[in-house]
Amino acid sequence: MSALEGVAAAFLLAGAGFYLAGTVGLLRFPDALSRLHALTKADNVGLLLVCVGLALVAGSPREAALLLLVWLMALLAATVSAHLIARRALADARDGASAVEGPP
Amino acid sequence: MNLVLDVALATALTVLAWRSLAGPDLFRGIVMYVVFGMVMAVAWARLGSADLAMAEAAIGAGVTGALVMVAYWRLRRIAPVEPADPSPRRSRLAATVAVLSAGVVAAIGLAAVQAIGPGGIAGRALVEALPATGLGNPITGVLVIFRNLDTVLEVAVLLAAYLAVRALLGDGGESLAQPPTQRGTLVAALVSVVAPMTVLVAVYLWRAGSQWPGGAFQAGAVLAACGVLLFLTGRLRPAVEAGPVVRAALVLGTAAFGVLGVAMLFVGQPLLAIPGSWAVYLIEAAMMVSIGVTLALLFAGAAGVGGGRR
Amino acid sequence: MTPATLGSATVWVLAAAAVFGVGLYALILARHLLRQLLAVKVMGSAVFLLLVVAAGPIDGALDGIPMALVLTGIVVAVSAVGFALALLVRLADVTGSISLEDDGGGDDGP
């Protein structure tokens, strides 16, 4: 395994570690907002590390750029979905978690 | 090492299927089903098929999850009571039948995997015939050229599903998905950025489908996802009547394929022969539009679309 | 990355069988129609998996024809789900229940 592949493997392992941390937070934290905090921070950084690790051993600069674009798009999606979930959690807490009427 | 990965994926699939179907909470079950679809997409990628991975993630997990979730909320409003637990005799019957059928499926699969003899005759013929068509993606070759009768009927089935849903829900019934009452500015900004990107990705998938993994179905599913996003944020409103543009888009796939196929008869070629790769692009573009519009309208439960607020 | 060895193909066949069994078990036991629909979809996914894996590899890569058939199957499955959900919603509108078993004997008709 060359030095570059070793560095890439280290990045991938670090990314996996971040994902593990995020999942542990998801399972162990008490309420929706703290779980969201764990998930968004850890998973986005984890994805960045995984993408960087894969970009290092990518076949061409185009592939590396596409991988980073993947991370950017996932970041966009995660941002807005986290925002929506957090708003809903706040609204539920305000209403006393009563029965909901419409689609989320 | 590869075997460990396979066993891990197989275990994950089984556990997810169990959690999705046998859990006490139906909402969690639906979410678990979407996760099951995603792991299935990873399984397809592991088995070496990027086309199937994309299709499963976009259609099997994404669109199906959205459809089921909307129906779940509608059903919950109508009939909020979950049915009671089944009798133990029924549980024993279910367990017996399930184990027996799993055994039959395993036996069939193992017999097929271990069969000795020249298998894959059609597959080899496909590999040999593919370069002559100018395509690089064997799945697109099968779908659009070699077994395109199946694909014509498949697009027709989508159209039939739309018509059947229209017949059931009728005009005047409220549509399934309702736009949320309050919209954050962040979501509006996201839609302004993501919707054009989605169209770009869809067009790329259509263009790339002839040589690399991609194609009309994945592109159509991505367009449908864009449509779902626009419906959810109120940019598109469900309408009771389908306008002429929507009607044209709905039948475009079936019509383009059918007309081209029949036209071939008049030129002296067999039915549904494909004259060149330009025809492949044309047909795939038509199917992409049809699939996207049909799936988005199935999600909205509506006949057509109207413009929403800006 | 293809299951060229016999071992991993066996694993996938067993996975397909297990998922099929789980789906059928849930289909028989479930009373809520939405659960039954999900169970049928899960069984369908298992069958797709079996189709692709049971066809042997052609020169190292998987056979392309079952893959195209499964792609068709995925799209047809989503059409069926759309239609089935409309049926469910209509049934719930008309009879007020989301299970086929609560109406024992007399029912309202179409």
Image (cartoon, rainbow, N blue to C red):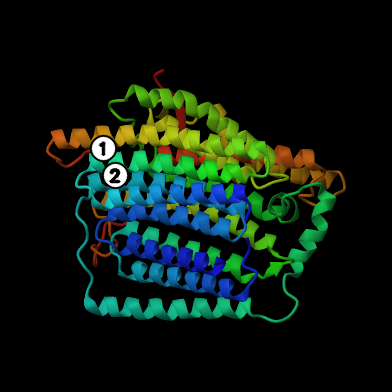
Given residues B25 and B68, the one toward you in this image is: B25
- Whole-percent x, y for residue B66 in the image: 40, 44
Q: In the rendered image, which quarter contains the C terminus of chain A?
A: top left
Above or below — where is B287 with respect to A13?
above
Quarter where residue A102 is shown: top left
- Describe the element under mark 2 as helix, strand or loop: helix
Label 1 marks a residue whose chain is A
**Residue under circle 2?**
B73
**Residue under circle 1?**
A102
Tell me what residue is drawn at x 39 percent, y 23 percent. B188
Mark 1 vs mark 2, CA separation in Å: 7 Å
Pointer 1 with pointer 2, Cβ within 8 A: yes
Tell me what residue is drawn at x 78 percent, y 51 percent. B271
Task: Tell me whether marks 1 and 2 sit on the same chain.
Answer: no
The amino acid on which the numbered mark 2 sits, given as a three-letter code, is Trp
Tell me what residue is drawn at x 82 percent, y 42 percent. B276
The amino acid on which the numbered mark 1 sits, given as a three-letter code, is Gly
